[in-house]
Amino acid sequence: MGANNIKKLKNRIKSVSSTRHLTKAMEIVAASKLKAATIAMENGRSYFYAMQDAIPPLAAAGDASIYTTVREVKRSCFVVIAGDRGLAGGYNNNIFKLAVTAIGKRKCVVLPIGKKSLDYFSGKGYDILSSSFSSVERIALPECARMGRQLAEFYARGEIDEVIVVYTVNHNILSQEPTMVTLLPIQKSSEVRDESVLFEPSAAAVADAVIPDYLGGMLYGAVKESFASELAARRMAMDSAYKNAGEMIDQLNLEYNRARQGAITQELTEIIGGTVE
């Protein structure tokens, strides 16, 4: 192997080594953010599941509310939560695949949350409800509350007929699952209604008052769940990339040493051959 190829191997080792350092740095950053994100996710889950249990009885209370009455779906709204950045394995692609499959040929509008979600759906030509929520990491409860009120208003005016949120559930650092939840109309509870529970002045009035805040709280829980999932996926992807880069460097070093040994052997052979002559 000539000196040219030896130089190429040396440059490639340097390049892979640089990439290895970068992936390690990104893994450390993701790991440092993951602890705080997990705490926020757990807090969001408490509200998320409490509201999931508390609100459906309103739909079974008998009084009709605009938010609990099922109607013909002419236009759907999909709230799709993805990441702000890439390099997280299949995290973003899995969410997009689920959302696009669910949308199918429906007439719909998309409310993207996260830069990757906004870029994907605007690039594909979908109708975008709002482009204001382009950062999953920085979104807070007030923004989610504003989002919930906006969705409730559109639903009440009949501009959309259902609201579905597509997000990622973080089971653990090794497992993140894309999933969908229908937020509007409120699904009736499968449990027998507790007749001792009274809604004053009526179930419909209570629903009309609390549903906008309910939507905001549910979206907040989904956002925090998704952000923790993104960080966990990125940490695992960067850890895998770091290990793969290490294995590649070992292989390249082996090839480099063999090439150098071959070049040295060739030079010695040439020198010996010249001496004999």
Image (cartoon, rainbow, N blue to C red):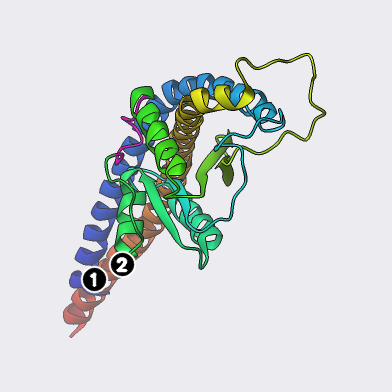
Q: Position of residue 187 (x, y in %)?
A: 66, 39
Instruction: Say what amino acid the circle numbered 2 marks.
Output: Ala
Q: Position of residue 190 (x, y in %)?
A: 78, 35
**Residue 137 colored in magenta in the image:** yes
Quick check: 81 left or right of 124? right
Instruction: Say what amino acid the circle numbered 1 marks.
Output: Asn
Compared to 30, does 236 lie above or below?
Answer: below
Q: Quadrant of the N terminus?
A: bottom left
Q: Quadrant of the C terminus?
A: bottom left
Q: Give the residue displayed 46% in from the left and 43% down from the top.
A: 155
**Residue 138 colored in magenta in the image:** yes
Q: CA distance from mark 1 to mark 2?
A: 8 Å
Q: Nearer the viewer, residue 26 or 177?
A: 177
Q: Position of residue 9 (x, y in %)?
A: 27, 63
Compared to 261, does 94 lie above or below?
Answer: above
> Which sits earlier in the primary sequence, circle 1 or circle 2?
1
Say what secondary structure mark 2 lies in.
Answer: helix
Residue segment shown in magenta: 133-140
Say what secondary structure mark 1 lies in.
Answer: helix
Q: Give the residue displayed 32% in from the left and 64% down from the top.
A: 125
* Mark 2 crowd level (few <14, some 14–19, many ≥20, 10 Å Cα): some
Q: Nearer the viewer, residue 56 or 51?
A: 56
Residue underneath mark 1 = 5
